Amino acid sequence: MTSQTVLAAAGQVSGGEEVTFWILAPLALLGAIGMVWARNAVHSALWLVLTMLCLGVFYVLQAGPFIGMVQIIVYTGAIMMLFLFVLMLVGRDASDSLIETLRGQRVAAVVLGLGFAGLIGSGLYRALEGVQAVGLDQPNAEGNVQGIARLLFTRYVFAFELTSALLITAAVGAMVLAHVERRKEDRMDQVATMKARFRPGNYPGPKPGPGVFATSSSVATPARLPDGRLTDRSIPEILPVRELTAEETSLKGTDK
């Protein structure tokens, strides 16, 4: 199918497009509600992935393949997967979202959110009242990707380059702030590291991995030694130890 055919059909709603919308629109709405309603942070992120996938399909149906693929590849495939990786790395628990530091903050957030949505909706209605909508035939005369490239590198080239410089500066600044410069005398060579490892009172053997012989795969769950005891050596110092239930801390296999 050529780009001219897609652009010619952009102003019409075909039967397949209508069916796709009525199938994916409830799923997108369900994903948005599930993202807010889910108590587990990982589940909330997965619900958001569902909504983003549906939005990407909607963009493609509206003769916008570039923004549709960007929505799926960049946001859903890269950013959300990185977000999920961070959440699973720190081992967030479902009980974290149940702790309220301020009383009534959820009710206030719902009221303010509804008020803000009403304000934005009424403003858009008054601004767009009486405006006749036009199709994408003129902007996408030579294709969707070509139209975006023409605007991006002609009319909005200064804003595009400024945004790129801002993102690069932010990335370099984050690396500079996270970098810890150590003095030369504080750096340990291989001999000093070996002596410190085998110093009396230390544990020279390899540390067990987190979650070994445990009922949870979280990196915040202590591993079990062969005798059944929990060991804190398997947990990185930057991660807090989550509270374990009595069932998780009980020794397994001792009832036989």
Image (spheres, grey):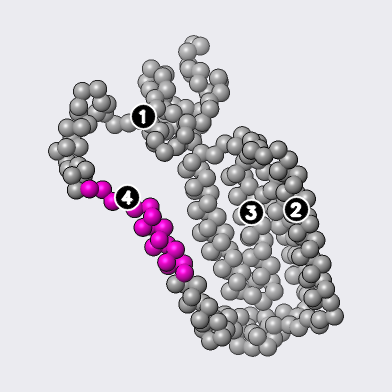
Q: Nearer the viewer, mark 1 or mark 2?
A: 2
Is residue 13 something one can see in this rendering? yes
- Disc 4 is placed on an element classified as loop
**Which dot marks residue 180?**
4
**Which dot marks residue 233?**
1
Q: Position of residue 210 (x, y in %)?
A: 42, 33
Q: Which residues are magenta?
A: 166-183
Q: Nearer the viewer, residue 36 or 21?
A: 36
User: Amino acid type of disc 1?
Assistant: Arg
- The answer to whether 206 is drawn above or below residue 60 in the figure is above
Instruction: Characterize the local packing of mark 4: few (<14), some (14-19) or many (20 or more) Cα atoms within 10 angstroms.
Output: few
Which residue is label 2 attached to? Answer: 112
Q: Earlier in the sequence, mark 1 or mark 2?
A: 2
- The answer to whether 6 is drawn above or below residue 85 in the figure is below
State the separation of the CA atoms marked 1 and 4. 24 Å
Q: Is residue 167 magenta?
A: yes
Q: Nearer the viewer, mark 1 or mark 4?
A: 4
Q: Earlier in the sequence, mark 1 or mark 3?
A: 3
Secondary structure mostly taken by the magenta-highlighted segment of the chain: helix
Q: Position of residue 53 (x, y in %)?
A: 63, 60
Q: Pointer 1 and pointer 3: residues touching (CB < 8 Å)? A: no
**Which dot marks residue 48?**
3
Q: Earlier in the sequence, mark 3 or mark 2?
A: 3
Q: Earlier in the sequence, mark 3 or mark 4?
A: 3
